[in-house]
Amino acid sequence: MTSVPVGAAASSPFSLITLFLQTDWVVKADILALLFMSVWSWTIIFEKMLLLHSVRDAAKRFQTAFWSGVSLDEMFDKLQLRPFHLDPMSSIFVAAMKEWRRSSGVVAAGLHGTSLQQRIDRVMQITMERESERIEKRMTFLASTGSVAPFLGLFGTVWGIINSFSAVAGMNNANLSIMARGISEALFTTALGLMAAIPAVLAYNKLTSDMTRYEQSLENFAGEFSTILSRQIDDKSLRDNKRSV
């Protein structure tokens, strides 16, 4: 191992790039992993923020149209024209209306309307779960980053300090100027770990809260729409019974 003169160590340029280049391959791999986790976390954060903003706005527009008194069949026909551009609330409505139309002859054929109501509720539940899964996709990575990144940073720090003290021992010189650079390289990974973990934890908590509120609004709509269809099933059954009499 070659020794570095004290003056040279003190006067050499100090930068994050220099710290990275001077670390060994274990710390380099640790730093690259933390940088990847940080970049990918911010990508997920921005993507989820835009997605939630989009689906909330779409839900407001849909509910305005839904409660405006427009015919359900008319709304369904319009939404059918753009099946690949539906927000979660519209998807729940379309799935229920498809089952309603597909089973329109069930009650008329003399079968009990309860089975139709159960099928519609099941279809809406499945659609809601599928849409919720799509919205929550990759959120686990944020939670994992918040939990793992500090420990990755600590691992890089411990490894770097071990290397730093080993180098000092090999030089037989405990001068602070010699140790400072090695310790700085080691602590750099701790800072990166915190930089990756803190935004991930904060964003995960905020996004999870927003997603929970939005999914609750989907459940509320599904319940309201189920009640509307249930009344229509009962009315249709009553009319068919009167005709048969």
Image (tube, rainbow, N blue to C red):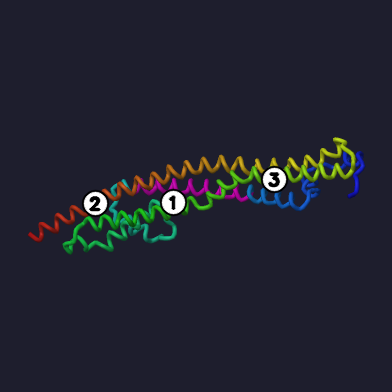
Q: Residues within 10 Å of mark 3 (few under 14, many from 20)?
A: some
Q: Which mark is residue 155?
A: 3
Label 1 to label 2: alpha-carbon separation: 25 Å
Name which residue type carries label 2.
Ser
Q: Please state which of residues 48 and 112 is positioned toward the viewer in this rendering.
A: 112
The main secondary structure of the magenta stretch is: helix
The answer to whether mark 2 and mark 3 are in CB contact below 8 A is no
Side of 34 relative to 132 (left or right): right
Q: Secondary structure at mark 1?
A: helix
Q: Residues within 10 Å of mark 2 (few under 14, many from 20)?
A: some
* Residue 86, percent from left and from top: 42, 56
Residue at the (71%, 52%) spot, across then down: 29
The answer to if 57 sits in the magenta stretch is yes
Residue at the (37%, 57%) spot, across then down: 79
Label 1 to label 3: alpha-carbon separation: 36 Å
Q: Residues within 10 Å of mark 1 (few under 14, many from 20)?
A: some
Q: Specify which label sits upstream in the sequence, 1 or 2.
A: 1
* Residue 16, percent from left and from top: 77, 44
Q: Which residues are magenta?
A: 39-65
Q: Please state which of residues 206 and 56 is positioned toward the viewer in this rendering.
A: 206
* Residue 73, percent from left and from top: 29, 57
Quadrant placement of the C terminus: bottom left
The answer to whether mark 1 and mark 3 are in CB contact below 8 A is no
Q: Specify which label sits upstream in the sequence, 2 or 3.
A: 3
* Residue 111, percent from left and from top: 18, 61
Name which residue type carries label 3.
Phe
Q: Specify which label sits upstream in the sequence, 1 or 3.
A: 1
Residue at the (46%, 45%) spot, across then down: 211
Residue at image mark 2:
230
Side of 154 relative to 133 (left or right): right
Q: Secondary structure at mark 3?
A: helix
